[in-house]
Image: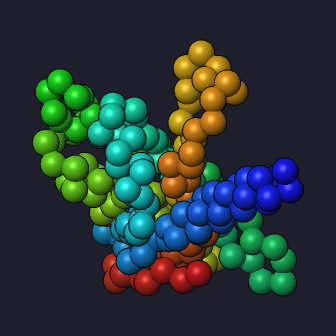
Amino acid sequence: MNRRWIFISMICFLGVLHAVNAESSAFIDNASGARNDQVLSVSFKVVNAFTPDMEKTILSGIPQTFTYYFEIYREIEAWPDLRIYNWTVRRTIRYDTLKKTFSVDLGSNDPPKQTTELAEAKKWMTEFEGYPVGVVPSLDRSFKHYLRLKAQLDPVKWPLFLDKILFFPSLGDFETPWQRIDLPLQGEEKNGGKQ
C-alpha cells in the first residue's frame, strides 16, 4: 500500500516539475524600441512558446490564446517610476481540421490571417515587428520612458465543466518574465531591450 502511494506521489511530482519547467522556458528575445518621426514602436519575439503537447492540441482543433501585457512607465529619480499607460493584446491560433488551415487572430480590427503552415502561424503568434506603442507628443520629453511587456498562455477553457471532472495534463503553460524596452524619445535610432 505504501509503495503505491509513493509511486503516485512521484508521478504527481514529475508532472508538476514538467509544468514548472515548461512555464519557465519561454522568454522574450530581440526586444528593441524605435522612433519613426513621432511614432514609437517596439519589436520582439517570444522564444520557446510552443511545446509539442500544445502543437498536438492545436492540431486537434482546440484554439490557443497568448496574452501580451504592455505598460509604459515614466522614469523618475529618487521615486518609484510612474506607470502612465497599460493595455493587453490577445492573439489566438485556430486550426480547421476539415480545411487543414490555420487562422490567427492578431487582436486587431483586421481579419484573421490564414495559412496552411504551422510554422508561419506560430510566427504570427509570437513576433511583433514595428508594433506602435505611442506617439512622442503624448509623453513628457523631459523624462525617460520605457515599456515593460510580458507574454502569457491563456489556460484552455474546457466545456461543460470537463476540467473539474477529468484530469487534463499541462499543455505547456507559460508566462515570460517582464522585459524592459527603452523608448527613444530624442532620436530615431533603435535601443536594445534590457531586463
Which residue occupies the foreground of this view, 193 or 164? 164
Q: Is residue 109 left or right of residue 79?
A: left
Q: Position of residue 177 (x, y in %)?
A: 61, 69
Report if residue 24 is visible in the image.
Answer: yes
Q: Measured along the vertical axis of the image, is residue 178 above or below residue 152?
A: below
Q: Position of residue 184 (x, y in %)?
A: 46, 77
What residue is rendered at 42% in x and 75% in y?
29
Q: Height in image: 46 above or below 132?
A: below
Residue at (27%, 57%) from the top-left corner? 123
Seen from this angle, which residue lies furthest top?
A: 160
Image quadrant holding the C terminus, namely bottom right
Q: Quadrant of residue 21?
A: bottom right
Considering depth in this image, is 124 or 42 the residue closer to the camera? 124
Q: Nearer the viewer, residue 98 or 10?
A: 10
Residue 132 visible? The answer is no
From the top left corner, tell me how far across and down residue 150 is, in percent.
56, 61
Q: What residue is shown at x 81% (from left), y 53% (from top)?
A: 5
Q: Is residue 94 above or below residue 44?
A: above
The vertical placement of 183 against 66, above or below, is: below
Residue 154 picture location, percent across and down: 55, 43
Q: Is residue 86 left or right of residue 124?
A: right
